[in-house]
Image (cartoon, rainbow, N blue to C red):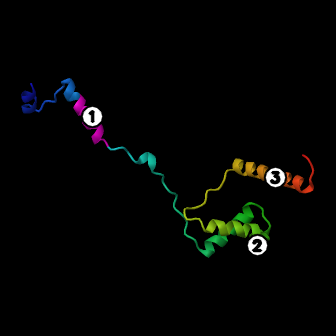
Amino acid sequence: YLKWAAENDFTSMLPRDTKWQWEDSILSMQSSLNAHLVQKVPMVQYSDAAFCDTAVQWVIETDQAIHALQHLAFQKLISIASKATNGVDIPTWKQTQQKIIDLFKTNLCNLCKHLQVLP
């Protein structure tokens, strides 16, 4: 049977042969990388003009005061973001809300400790 199968290009269906073929096919399969790859959003190249235009647009769209760009907290934000090598992950409004609540509670507890008042 085995000789005939080899001569006639026939795939043997004997149990030991099918097990060997199944193991061989599993070993020869290469897994896909698609699930592990994440497409990057192309980064906008920095220029002073582009930054100025974007900053002015931000002031207008968010109804900020004109001097908001000179505020120390804004400058610190820009300084930190400028050191990012792969872009910046901006938190969602829910994450921002939770961070503000946590910060408020922390400051309130610190104030109570400072004033030695029990909550």
Q: Say whether disc 3 or disc 1 marks the residue closer to the N-terminus.
A: 1
Residue at position x 6%, y 32% in the image? 7
**Do tag 3 and tag 1 residues touch (Cβ < 8 Å)?**
no
Residue at position x 67%, y 50% in the image? 92
Type of amino acid under label 3: Phe
Type of amino acid under label 2: Gln
Residue under numbered circle 3: 104
Q: Quadrant of residue 21?
A: top left
**Do tag 1 and tag 2 residues touch (Cβ < 8 Å)?**
no
Residue at position x 25%, y 37% in the image? 24
Q: Nearer the viewer, mark 2 or mark 3?
A: 3
Q: Say whether disc 1 or disc 2 marks the residue closer to the N-terminus.
A: 1
Q: Position of residue 78 (x, y in %)?
A: 67, 68
Q: Magenta segment, which residues?
A: 19-29
Q: Secondary structure at mark 1?
A: helix
Label disc, if present, on residue 109 of the rendered structure: none
Q: Quadrant of residue 110?
A: bottom right
Q: Is residue 7 left or right of residue 94?
A: left
Residue under numbered circle 1: 23
Q: Position of residue 88 (x, y in %)?
A: 60, 60
Residue under numbered circle 2: 70
Judging depth in this view, the residue of 108 and 66 nearest the camera is: 108
Q: Is residue 84 left or right of residue 67?
A: left
Q: Residues within 10 Å of mark 1 (few under 14, many from 20)?
A: few
Q: Is residue 114 left or right of residue 47?
A: right
